[in-house]
Amino acid sequence: KHPSFPWNSARTCHRRGGTERERERETRCPGGGVGRKMVKTVVIVMAMKAEAQPFIDHLDLQKDADRFHKGLRAECYSGTYKGETKVHLVLNGQCHKYGVDIVGTVGGAVTTFAAVQALSPDLVINAGTCGGFRALGGEVGSIYLCTSFLNHDRRIAIPGFDAFGVGELNTFDLNPELLAQVGAQSGVVSTGNSLDMTKEDEGYIKKHKATCKDMEGAAVAYMCDQLSVPMFALKSVTDIVDGEHPTPEEFLKNLGTAAKSLQQALPKVLSFIAEKPFQA
C-alpha cells in the first residue's frame, strides 16, 4: 500500500547515527518509528540558470544573497508555494574563472551540501535537463521522475572500488499517483562529467537501463544519502543520445523547450508533496 506522499517508507533514510542532525532527521524519515514530519521546506537543486529561470519567474522566487558562504558561487532563490511550503531553488552559480554555469558532479555535490546545511530541507529535488534514449522511448520534452542513480564514467578496476565507482543508489520508490499527476515516466539517471558518450560510457548506461544521461544527479543523490535527506530527480529531455543529431547542437536548440517543461512539471510535484506528512 502506497502512502499519500511520493516515497515508500521501506527504503528511505535507512542510515541512523548519533549526531544531533542525524537524530533530528529520524523524526523525518518514513519507517523511523519516531514521529511525523510535514514537508514544509523543499530545496530544488539545479545547475543552469537557463533551466531554472522559467520556474523562478513562475513562483516569483527572490534571490537570497546571504544564504551561503560568501566565497561559494552557489545562488539561492526563495519563496513559498501557495503561501505555505517554503521553496528554495539553488543553483551552482557561475564559475569565477570561466564565467559559465558550473555544471558537473563537483558543483552538484558542493551546492547540495551547502543547501542542506543552510536550509534544513525536508526534501531535495534535483531538477534539470538530460539526454534521453530513443531505444527506451525517450523523446525531446519527455519528463522523468527518478529515484535510481549511478555513474557511468567512474571506472576504477580495483575490487571494491569498482562498485563504488558505479555507485548505484536507490533513494525510495515513487508513488504511481505522483507519476500520473505530473505526467511523467519513472526513470534511472546515469551521471557523468562529459556531454558526449564514449563506448565505455554507453556500455554502463545500457547495462543499467538508464533512461536519463545527466551531469549532476548521482552526485546530488549521494550527498543526500550521506545526510539522510529524502531526494528524487525531475528530468526533462533536451537531446536524444542515440539519435542522429549532434548532442551539443540538439541540447542548445531544445534547452528553452525543456526548461518550460520543467516549469510546468515542478508545480505539479510541489502540489502533490506539499504539507504532507512522512509516515513514521
Image (spheres, rainbow, N blue to C red):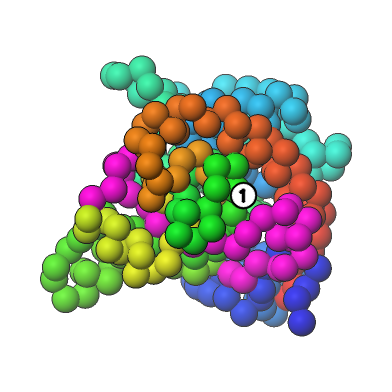
Residue 264 % position (x, y): 72, 38
Residue 197 among those drawn in magenta? yes
Which class describes the residues within 10 Å of circle 1: few (<14), some (14-19), or many (20+)? many
- Image position of 11 with respect to 223: above or below: below
- Image position of 235 with respect to 99: above or below: below
Residue 178 % position (x, y): 74, 60
Residue 156 % position (x, y): 17, 63
Where residue 78 sits, quadrant-wise, is top right
Q: Nearer the viewer, residue 237 or 125?
A: 237
- Left or right: residue 214 compared with residue 259: left
Would residue 219 be seen by someone viewing this image from the given angle? no
Where residue 262 sits, quadrant-wise, is top right
- Image position of 26 with respect to 251: above or below: below
Give the position of the C terminus as an image quadrant.
Answer: bottom right
- At a point 65% along the width and 32% down the height, the residue shown is 260
- At a point 55% along the width and 42% down the height, the residue shown is 140
Q: Which residue is mark 1?
A: 143
- At a point 16% along the width and 76% down the height, the residue shown is 159
